[in-house]
């Protein structure tokens, strides 16, 4: 495994473009990333983690515009939450085209999307476009919060070719909510409380 300094964005972009899996920093924990148009790389993420195929891979993007371009549109509640909490530690599971959902392993026509609040991740995503990214860890173990930890866990195998060193990360994952026309449902607690998210929606709806 290659450990890439933060100035090696071009190398990380090239490795991803050639179908490699690259570990990247985010504002929550380090993640294993692959391009959405590289099916072999997506399969390698599942293999490297030992992740069950029934657990779909989330998608990270550089902006709301990238997300909308990818999936077509967002529910009103998702737009409201994105305005308040993106970039940030909020993953929203939203309706998506079935072909995109199938790429990341979703049996339903939904995908999890997030814009991370990490400058290096945002620069990379601006170059590559949206990436499938899931926490860098063996399934069921604690996520990695540094490039050195990623190298310790995945360095001996061949599925993860590099890690982009963005310094230490948080040890708290993103909050995950499902969004549809009926509103918001909490799926996993995380860095942003469900109460704050619900309050954001209520304040928006109370405005004249």
Image (tube, grey):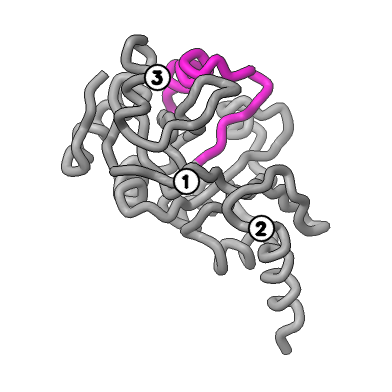
Give the residues in magenta.
36-59
Q: Give yes or no for contact between labels 2 and 1 (Cβ–Cβ under 8 Å).
A: no
Q: Residues within 10 Å of mark 1 (few under 14, many from 20)?
A: many
User: Which quadrant holds the C terminus?
Assistant: bottom right
Question: Where, by quadrant of the figure, is residue 163 drawn?
Answer: top left
Q: How far is disc 3 from disc 2 in space, using C-alphas?
A: 30 Å
Q: Earlier in the sequence, mark 3 or mark 2?
A: 3
Q: Residues within 10 Å of mark 3 (few under 14, many from 20)?
A: some
Instruction: Examine the rendered structure and indicate whether residue 181 appears above or below residue 172.
Output: below
**Residue 53 belongs to the span the image colors magenta:** yes
**Residue 191 belongs to the span the image colors magenta:** no
Q: How far is disc 2 from disc 1 in space, using C-alphas?
A: 14 Å
Q: Is residue 95 visible?
A: yes
Q: Which mark is residue 28?
A: 1
- Residue at x 72%, y 63% (from the top left corner): 195
Identify residue for label 3. Answer: 153
Question: At which x and y percent is residue 91?
Answer: 59, 48
Disc tally is 3
- Residue at x 31%, y 32% (from the top left corner): 147
- Residue at x 33%, y 49% (from the top left corner): 126
Q: Which mark is residue 193?
A: 2
């Amino acid at each position: 495994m290659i450990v890439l300094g933060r100035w090696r964005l071009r190398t990380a972009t090239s490795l991803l473009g050639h179908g490699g899996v690259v570990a990247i920093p985010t504002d929550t924990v380090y993640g294993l990333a692959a391009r959405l148009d590289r099916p072999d790389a997506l399969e390698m993420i599942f293999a490297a983690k030992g992740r069950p195929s029934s657990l779909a891979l989330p998608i990270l993007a550089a902006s709301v515009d990238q997300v909308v371009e990818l999936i077509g549109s967002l529910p009103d509640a998702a737009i409201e939450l994105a305005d308040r909490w993106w970039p940030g530690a909020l993953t929203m599971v939203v309706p998506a085209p079935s072909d995109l959902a199938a790429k990341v392993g979703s049996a339903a026509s939904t995908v999890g999307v997030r814009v991370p609040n990490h400058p290096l991740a945002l620069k990379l995503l601006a170059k590559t476009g949206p990436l499938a990214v899931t926490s860098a860890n063996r399934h069921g173990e604690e996520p990695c919060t540094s490039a050195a930890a990623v190298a310790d866990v995945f360095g001996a195998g061949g599925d993860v070719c590099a890690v982009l060193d963005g310094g230490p990360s948080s040890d708290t994952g993103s909050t995950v909510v499902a969004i549809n026309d009926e509103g918001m449902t909490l799926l996993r607690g995380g860095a942003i409380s469900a109460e704050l998210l619900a309050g954001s929606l209520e304040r928006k709806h109370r405005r004249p």
